[in-house]
Image: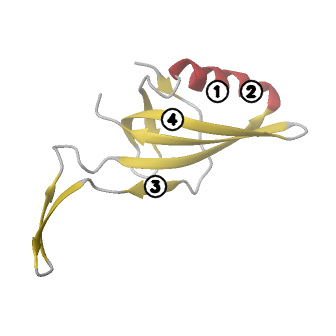
Amino acid sequence: METFNWDVAPGINEKAEPKVKIIKLGDGYEQRTKDGINNDLRSYSVTLTVPIDEAPPIDDFLTRHGGVKAFLWKEPNRNRLITVKCPSWSSKVMHTAKTITATFEEVVA
């Protein structure tokens, strides 16, 4: 499995949305339980700003994985290596730099 080795800009957005099964019982009562073993996988919105000539390898990496194939990424907040996929990314080309904004979603396999 490949590793995403580029440094992302500080201030990433981390989203947690645990999967929960809810059974409505009536009169406002409900029963809640975790939906699966890995129900609390995170999503990260990351940004990289690199010189224009350093952007192609990043684009190639994300394109090669195509939103399907998982890769390793070192999460800056906790400094741990996690498995993620990148279902979407966008680029903004400036005069001498390129800004890439991507969504990394934690996966189990």
Is residue 19 shown left or right of residue 43?
left
Residue at image location 72% in from the left, 38% down from the top: 91
Disc 2 is placed on an element classified as helix
Residue 66 position in % (x across, y down): 53, 23
Disc 4 is placed on an element classified as strand
Mark 4–mark 2 distance (CA, rounded to whole Å)? 22 Å
Label 1 near label 2: C-beta < 8 Å? yes
Q: Label 4 belongs to which residue?
A: 87
Above or below, comparing residue 77 to residue 86 in the picture: below
Q: Label 2 belongs to which residue?
A: 54
Q: Label 1 belongs to which residue?
A: 58
Mark 3–mark 4 distance (CA, rounded to whole Å)? 15 Å
The kind of residue on which mark 2 rests is Glu
Image mark for residue 14: 3
Mark 3–mark 1 distance (CA, rounded to whole Å)? 21 Å
> Camera-side residue: 95 or 20?
20
Mark 4–mark 1 distance (CA, rounded to whole Å)? 14 Å
Q: Quick one: label 4 or label 1, which is nearer the N terminus?
A: 1
Residue at image location 74% in from the left, 36% down from the top: 50
Q: Which residue is at the far front? A: 26
Q: Residues within 10 Å of mark 2 (few under 14, many from 20)?
A: few
